[in-house]
Every structure is written in C-alpha cells, then in structure tokens.
Amino acid sequence: MLWLTWRQHRIQLLVTLGFLAVLGGVLLLSVQVAVGAANGEISLYCHGGGVPCREYDAGLEDLYQKVYPLVAMVPFIPLLAGVFWGAPLLAREYERNTHQLAWTQSVGRGHWLAVKFGVLAGCAMLAGLASGQMFGAWLEMFPGKAESFAETSYFGALGVAPAAWWLFAFTLGTAAGVLVRKTLPAIAITVAVFLAAAIALLLLRPHYAEPVRTLGPDAATKGALIVKLGRVTPDGREMSSLDNVPGCPVGIGKSACAQAAGYQDFTVYQPVDRFWRFQWTEAGILLAATAVLGGVAVGGTVRRRR
C-alpha cells in the first residue's frame, strides 16, 4: 500500500515539494541580499562603519516591501494540500469507478483508506511545519515582524499553526471528495470552505483571550493585536472611535490638543507575549475541525456500499 500510495500521488507530492523549494530559495536569496556579500557588513552598519543603523533598517524595510507580494500568499499555501492532495484522493476513485476494484482486493477498505489518508496527512503536517519554520526564519531578518501580531495575515503561516492549516485543508478536500464524488466540485468546495475558515478565524482571533485595556501611550501595544481604539471624554464617556474633538484642529497636533482638553486615548489589545498561546489555540480549533471532517471522510467511505 505504501508503494501504491507513492505511485498514485507522487506527482502531487513532488510538485508541492518543488513549490516549497522555490519559495524557500526566493526567501533565502532575499536574506542574502539583506545581509550583504561581506560577513562584516552588518557590524559596519551598526558600529560606526559610516552608515547608521537606521539607514540599514530602512533598507531592510524596503526589501521587505519588495518581497511582500510573494509572502502575502504564504497563508494560502495549505490550499495545495486540499486542492491537489485531498480533493482527488477519493473523488477520482469514484469518478473512474476504480474504487470498486481497489476495495474488492485482499486489502480491506479500511486498511486502504488508513494507509493512503495517513501517509498523505503526515506529509501535509510535515510540509506545514517546514513552511512555518522557513517563513519564520525569514521574518527574523526584519525587526518586529516575527512572533508578533504586526501582520495578522501572517499568523497562520508561522509557528505550529501552518501544520494544523495544512492538515485541515487536506482533510477538508478529502471529505468534500467523499461527499460530492466529483473532483472539480470537491476542489471548489475546498477552496470556498478554506477561505471562509480563514476569514472566520481572522475575526475570532482577537477574542481567544480577554484583551488588555490601557489608557494613553503604552509601549506594550507595539506589535500587539489591536482589538479596539477609542477615546475617553473628560466626563468618562467612551467615544466609539478617535473622533474629532471640538475646538481641536484636524491632522497634526490633534492628539496633543485632545489631551490638553482632558481627553484620553485608549487601546484594547492582545499583547505580543500571547503569540504562542494563540498559536496553540488556533491549532486546537483547526484540529477539532479536522477531526470532524476526518470522521465525515472515513464514515462516508467505509459505510458506503458502492
């Protein structure tokens, strides 16, 4: 069964591996450009070598913005496992009627499914872990970007979350294939549900824990996940947003004028030190959804008579 699984799915596995290799190569190349040809270049930048650190940081930010269009796709990479691995896994067997031959051989239906699903699920988790580590290592080059909430869209592409997203996408595609028994509709369902889940968790993420509320400037809000911004009037009423204060100019100087008039800005946020707690929370949510989808896929396959 292991050899059969490799024979039937080697193209999808190799294409995905090649894609990750290309992405890793691009990220590695950008890191080499950032570091520079000479090993001592960074120390020259930051230890009086003639170029101030702030200029080097500005160069890093410029490089980051150039590569940003590519890395913005990273959170959607798990769709590869759902579209190319999961959706065709059983839907293609049903379309070609090869499942009747495969499930009447010496290998039972449960064993057939366990090996194929288990191997590909394991590969999906490994690919997710590799992707997360690769992307996280790249972000380490850019101050304030790694292990923070600065870019909320990156959260699912860092740490342990990518492994859960890859496994979720693969299981989602498999379950869709069992339910509709057609590859193209299964792919469409996989994409739609994956995007809906990504949006839902993006909206739910600020509420994984009770947020912190602070008045006035707070250094802890740097890189934090901002839940709400607002302003408190001198009589204690909470304004829904940073609305204009009567008598204060719009634009430069507005905040200082508002503070002088007795108004205070407030921030509701999730601190950066909750990053890994939120990572495991999101992974747990995805694994729970994966278990439900896995039950649908297994139950629909094992119990179906034809």
Image (tube, rainbow, N blue to C red):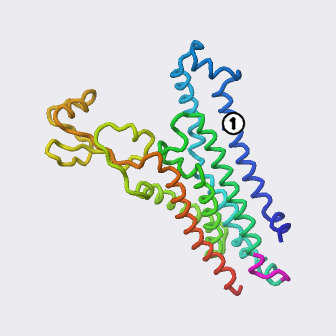
Quadrant of the image containing the N terminus: bottom right
At a point 65% along the width and 27% down the height, the residue shown is 35
Residue 227 lies, in percent from the top left, at 37, 50
* Number of other residues with Cα within 10 Å of mark 1, as a class: few under 14, some 14 to 19, many 20 or more: some
Describe the element under mark 1 as helix, strand or loop.
helix
Q: Nearer the viewer, residue 123 or 103?
A: 123
Choose between 114 and 185: the one closer to the eye. Answer: 114
Give whichever of 192, 287 is nearer the camera.
287
Q: Is residue 126 above or below residue 147?
A: below
Q: Is residue 265 left or right of residue 285?
A: left
Q: Which residues are magenta?
A: 105-112
Q: Is residue 215 part of the magenta span, yes or no?
A: no
Q: Residue 186 location in percent, x, y?
A: 62, 68
> What residue is shown with label 1?
28
Image: 273 above or below 178: above
Question: Residue 282, position in %: x, y?
Answer: 52, 59
In this view, 279 is above or below 303: above
Which corner quadrant holds the C terminus?
bottom right
Q: Is residue 109 magenta?
A: yes
Q: Residue furthest bottom?
A: 305
Q: Looking at the image, is 193 positioned above or below residue 61?
A: below
